[in-house]
Amino acid sequence: MKEFPSWLRERYEERQDYLTRNLAVLKAHCSEMGRSYDEIERTVLGTIQVAPEAMNSVQVIELCRELADLGFQHVIFNMPNVHEIRPIEIIGQEVIPQVAD
């Protein structure tokens, strides 16, 4: 994660607390509105960089599982090196088959 700006690294490092708080806020709003929290597809947006000096497929898989354990059902990733084909191949061949469920 050293390639990312400091604010993004900090958000990444503090992600569990940050996301847990946001889900609690969502749950409270649902309660106030009389809407079922469980009926909402909980989605999260993040940034990853699959590269030798950044993240590998195992780390991305672990991140996806961590987000699922927090309660997220859908993950969308920005990839700053999306113009490179190899990271996309890694996501398709190594990550998606492990986290598709």
Image (cartoon, grey):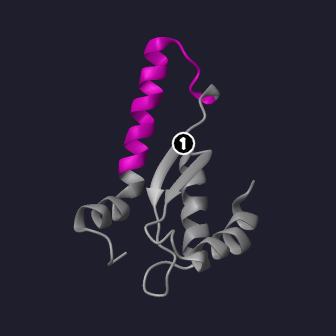
Residue 93's x, y, as percent?
A: 73, 73
Q: Quadrant of residue 40?
A: top right
Q: Is residue 12 left or right of residue 51?
A: left
Magenta segment: 18-38
Q: Is residue 45 left or right of residue 6?
A: right
What residue sits right under mark 1 in the picture?
Answer: 43
Which residue appears farthest toward the front when viewing the image? 83
SS of the residue at dot 1?
Answer: strand
Closest to the observer: 28 or 52? 52
Residue 59's x, y, as percent?
A: 55, 74
Relative vertical location of residue 60 with respect to residue 73 in this rendering, above or below: below
Q: Quadrant of residue 29?
A: top left
Residue 36 falls inside the magenta stretch:
yes
Which residue appears farthest toward the left when viewing the image? 6
Relative vertical location of residue 2 with respect to residue 26 in this rendering, above or below: below
Q: Amino acid at mark 1?
A: Thr
Residue 6 falls inside the magenta stretch:
no
Residue 66's x, y, as percent?
A: 55, 59
